[in-house]
Image (tube, coloured by chain):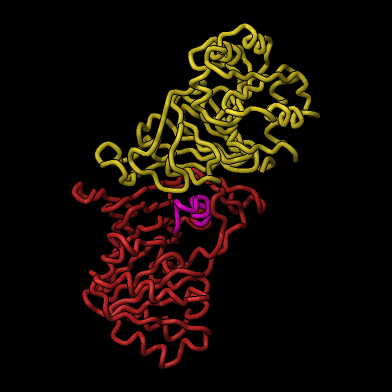
Chain colours: A red, B yellow
Amino acid sequence: MADRGPLLIIGGHEDKEGDKRILSALARLLDGGKLVLATVASHEPDGYFEAYRQAFEGLGVTDLVELYVNERSDSGSEEVLARLEGAAGVFFTGGDQLRISSQIGDTAIERRIHEIHRAGGVVAGTSAGAAVMSETMLVKGPSGESYRIGELHMAPGLGLMRHVIIDQHFAERGRYGRLLGAVAHNPRLLGVGVDEDTALLVEGDEGRVLGSGAVYIVDGEEATHSNIAEARAERPLSIFDVRMHVLSCGDRFHFSRRRPTPGPDEEA
Amino acid sequence: MADRGPLLIIGGHEDKEGDKRILSALARLLDGGKLVLATVASHEPDGYFEAYRQAFEGLGVTDLVELYVNERSDSGSEEVLARLEGAAGVFFTGGDQLRISSQIGDTAIERRIHEIHRAGGVVAGTSAGAAVMSETMLVKGPSGESYRIGELHMAPGLGLMRHVIIDQHFAERGRYGRLLGAVAHNPRLLGVGVDEDTALLVEGDEGRVLGSGAVYIVDGEEATHSNIAEARAERPLSIFDVRMHVLSCGDRFHFSRRRPTPGPDEEA
């Protein structure tokens, strides 16, 4: 575990023109190494690579290649695999997390990415690229309303991080309801909601918040009641005694202890 | 306290055409008595009265009068006060909660409404009319984003219900961030977030959920850390160990014990 690389879980819309706090953090982690920009989540990846190439200009990320697969059958091709050669990190951009899992799940590409991560390489993901990191991932569910029983689609993710379920564009799209719903399914999973232009940098067993928004931790371990298994579909969720932490820049969260730590004042 | 009338705290957009679950509950509480529709929150109250008159048709609420004041100076007039004579209940409709508190706060109208409530009359409020019920009320704050220090406007409300702060259109407008921010200011106040077409019917020290959405209870009593007093303005809020309950139709909440109780299955 100690040798595994960091994960950078970004809630979407990270700043690409201003102080680029999150992309700068990624550049520091790469330390001049090669970054593979995996645009697999997108149905129309045109323009993504160029936008990130410009954003990374001046941050020292000069060795940048794109990885895209149109069809699952491409995921074993030597040409595609060659793009991952010598990578110091992989960055999954946004789109549809189900495209990532269905196109590269259980393929040679996925295995190579896990190898890179296990060897200390960084894996970053924004929006869909963040959601896909967990073992079980949130695919679809209503934003801006309370969770109703049966309304959530989950699916197996890439499993880069265990025991969590990740949601993104969190406060911006009002996704508390669906993350609470996801956690209610099995409180073994800790809910992690990441705002836009905000990231959780996970190293070892601890995460630290970067960027301009907040990261929400929804812990259902001590929940005393939920109607998720009994109630009929379309009924709103009830769940009592959920513990919630709101973390902002500099704050840390220790995953196996399930405990937050305030950041130092100077980071505030 | 036992003699006080019920409060019906509605999150806005209660159904006026379908099964009207919330308006029906209000009609039952009135039991044929007179209802005063207070449209004070609105700058342009035209049409409100007629819409509610139609909605209450068939529910047995036939004695319905409107109470509106253009100027604070009208709030003492005998003509306006006469409208409250013999009322079994008062219903504050939506608009701007600051209009309610600034137009009728500390006037003869407000005193008369408190008298009606203390004598067992029902006070209902939807949207702004719900927000205004607490001692300290939420006036304005960003929806759909995490709370940033300094971004919230609070003001004294009508004080019909103590020790709570109420937010409305809750999940629909993504207001978790601002309610968490409000609670962080002083965890003595319990945060109550009410979804649209959803109400909390408070009788004595207990509330029961009605309608199609959820009611969120945000309890900061055991919070272990918050940066609200130290951090500079514009910084996102951090707060750790907030207890949250999501209540749906039939669930109850006991305010002085701060404990929820699941509703009976048949109400599910």
Residue A179 falls within the magenta-colored stretch: yes
Extreme residue toward the left, this view:
A266
Extreme residue toward the bottom, this view:
A78
Count of number-bearing discs? 0
Q: Position of residue A156 (x, y in %)?
A: 50, 70
Q: Quadrant of the N terminus of chain A?
A: bottom left
Q: Position of residue B255 (x, y in %)?
A: 49, 29
Whether A43 is drawn above or below B182: the answer is below
Q: Is residue A241 visible?
A: no
Q: Is residue A203 left or right of residue A214?
A: left
Please name whichever residue, A257 or B126, is drawn nearer the observer in this view of the structure: B126
* Residue at the image position 51 percent from the left and 26 percent from the top: B132
Extreme residue toward the top, this view:
B78
Please name whichever residue, A80 or B49, is drawn nearer the observer in this view of the structure: B49
Q: Position of residue A75 (x, y in %)?
A: 47, 86
Residue B89 falls within the magenta-colored stretch: no
* Residue at the image position 70 percent from the left and 21 percent from the top: B30
* Residue at the image position 47 percent from the left and 48 percent from the top: B144
Q: Is residue A214 left or right of residue B144?
A: left
Q: Is residue B7 left or right of residue B29?
A: left
Q: Position of residue A21 (x, y in %)?
A: 28, 61
* Residue A108, quarter of the rendered image: bottom left
* Residue at the image position 53 percent from the left and 23 percent from the top: B100
Whether B45 is drawn above or below A53: the answer is above
Whether A153 is drawn above or below A102: the answer is above
Q: Is residue A214 visible?
A: yes
Q: Is residue B217 left or right of residue A142?
A: left
Please name whichever residue, A243 or A112, is drawn nearer the observer in this view of the structure: A112
* Residue A203, quarter of the rendered image: bottom left
Whether A81 is drawn above or below A91: the answer is below
The magenta region covers: A169-182
